[in-house]
Image (tube, helix red, strand yellow):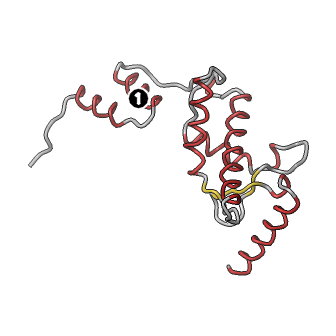
Amino acid sequence: MSEPEISIEDFLDKALLMAKRDDEAKKVLALSKGETIQSPFKDNKPPPEYVRAVRFHSINVIFNIWNEQVKSGGEGIDIYIGDVVKPVQEKVRFLISIGAWKFGIPGELTIRRRVEEAALPKYYPETGKPAIVSIGEPGYYRPSPYYLSPQTRQAMHQAIKASEILT
């Protein structure tokens, strides 16, 4: 038995319906018209203010998630990088709706890259202290103890020591 044939139009209609994000749907539509897809940025390089803004909102999401864990009585466990993507995109959608964002919605890989950068000291020349740190498994982050209150910093150090003893 062979697969039923599907027209290009039907295939593209289904592809458009399955697209999860607006920008993906636009790409599928552009391809259906024979257009080529290029980066929205000149020379395929995003402007520094876009990169900084996405990094800032990614860091903000990590701090917010971590603070909510601590406020609800938890010890503030590491945040998975994948859990940062949707809140950052929602924040950007809000900023677009009020006219405070002039770029498109960043994709998942862009946000992941900015999170990974936020854990590197080279992006903080003033202090040399990254805003977030990755302790343990790759892809899991928490606020840098450097930016926390002394009491919270102490509790975090104790939790890290305890987890090192257990592993």
From the image, tell me which residue sits under label 1: 25
Write down the quadrant of residue 107 in the picture: top right
Q: Secondary structure at mark 1?
A: helix
Q: Nearer the viewer, residue 43 or 91?
A: 91
Residue lying at the far front of the rendered structure: 72
Residue positioned 64% across, 24% down in the render: 101
Q: Is residue 132 above or below residue 41?
A: below
Q: Amino acid at mark 1?
A: Ala
Nearer to the camera, 14 or 71 = 71
Q: Residues within 10 Å of mark 1 (few under 14, many from 20)?
A: some
**Which x, y percent locates residue 104?**
57, 26
Placement of 142 over or under 123, stated as above or below: below
Question: Image check: 149 left or right of 67?
Answer: right
Question: In the visual, does 110 lie left or right of 47?
Answer: left
Q: Position of residue 154 (x, y in %)?
A: 85, 66
Residue drawn at x 32%, y 33% as measured from the top left: 17
Q: Up-down: is 167 above or below 120? A: below
The image shows residue 85 at horizontal and vertical percentages of 57, 44
In the visual, does 140 lie left or right of 2?
Answer: right
In the image, 132 versus 76, the foreground residue is 76
